[in-house]
Amino acid sequence: MKPEKTWTEEIVIAGNQLVERVTQLAAEGNVRRLTIRKSSGETLLEIPLTAGVAVGGVFTIVAPILAALGALAALLAEVKLEVIHTGEPPRD
């Protein structure tokens, strides 16, 4: 069995965009893990996701996390999202 290929992306966003961006990433279906960090680098939350979960299932699983993220986002000016994707990275 071949090992699964993964690649990492780091995104810096405003705190008020956190919930929307996490929702978009979860819906993509190729995200293995999301790590949310303060701009200083301190880890706030790690969210493991199962790649290939149906979109409806993702929202059911992630809904409680999104509620917590909404409260967290109100307190932060800027956050870093570290996103671990499965599969091949997009070509520019």
Image (cartoon, rainbow, N blue to C red):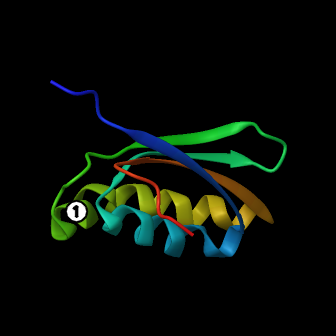
Which residue in the rendered view is the most extreme toward the right?
40
Disc 1 designates what residue? 60
**Residue under the image location 39 percent in, 52 percent down:** 88
Identify the image quadrant of residue 26.
bottom left
Tell me the quadrant of the picture where the C terminus can be found: bottom right
Determine if residue 76 is in view.
Answer: no
**Is 4 placed left or right of 57 in the picture?**
right
Q: How many marks?
A: 1
With 1 as the anchor, is 15 left or right in this view?
Answer: right
Q: Where is residue 21 in the image (x, y as percent from the top left)?
A: 52, 70
Identify which amino acid the numbered label 1 is placed on. Answer: Thr
Residue at 18% over, 56% down: 53
User: In the rendered view, does 69 fall on the left or right side of 1?
Assistant: right
- x and y percentages locating residue 55 in the rendered image: 21, 69
* The N terminus, quarter of image: top left
Front residue of 23/92: it is 92
**Residue 31 in picture, x, y percent from top left:** 38, 52
Counting from the top left corner in percent of width and height, residue 58 is at: 25, 61
Is the residue 59 above or below the residue 45 in the image? below
User: Can see residue 5?
Assistant: yes
